[in-house]
Image (cartoon, rainbow, N blue to C red):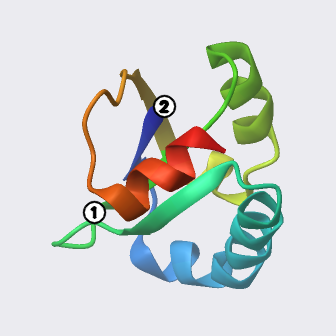
Amino acid sequence: MFILILTYKAPIEKILELLDAHCRYLDKYYATKNFLASGPQVPREGGIILCRAKSRAEVEEIIKEAPFNAVADYQIIEFEANKAVEKFQELLDK
């Protein structure tokens, strides 16, 4: 399991210009079950994506497609989810 932390490095106006493309990118990886949850940080200085992937290399390949690459830095944090509520555990087991 991976947490992707996006930190904006451009004005919010530029982020908003790319938002539709970013949403299509998210939809693609929700469809493949790689992305489990995502959303903006509060305050809106970046975003968070909860990502399921086989390896860090796979995550890096997924991030290469991200429209926000030009306007955000991505931090990848890997962790082992060894405890979760039942419904979430079902997602982890797939």
Secondary structure type for disc 1: loop
Q: Is 39 in front, or is 88?
A: 88
Q: Quadrant of the C terminus?
A: top right
Secondary structure type for disc 2: loop
Q: Is residue 40 above or below residue 69?
A: below
Q: Is residue 78 above or below residue 75?
A: above
Q: Is residue 19 above or below residue 11?
A: below
- Please give the residue where the numbered disc 1 appears in the rendered image: 45
Q: Position of residue 23 (x, y in %)?
A: 69, 77
Q: Is residue 23 above or below residue 1?
A: below
- Please give the residue where the numbered disc 2 appears in the rendered image: 1
The residue carrying pointer 2 sits among few (fewer than 14), some (14 to 19) or many (20 or more) residues within 10 Å by Cα, namely: many
Amino acid tagged 2: Met
As drawn, is 45 to the left or to the right of 31? left
As drawn, is 1 to the left or to the right of 48? right
Residue 39 appears in the picture as rendered = yes
- Tell me the residue at 27%/46% (across/down): 84
Q: Position of residue 87 (x, y in %)?
A: 40, 64
Number of numbered discs visible in the structure rendering: 2
Residue that lies at the very extreme toward the left in this rendered image: 43
As drawn, is 19 to the left or to the right of 38? right
Residue 9 appears in the picture as rendered = no
The residue carrying pointer 1 sits among few (fewer than 14), some (14 to 19) or many (20 or more) residues within 10 Å by Cα, namely: some
Q: Position of residue 59 (x, y in %)?
A: 67, 29
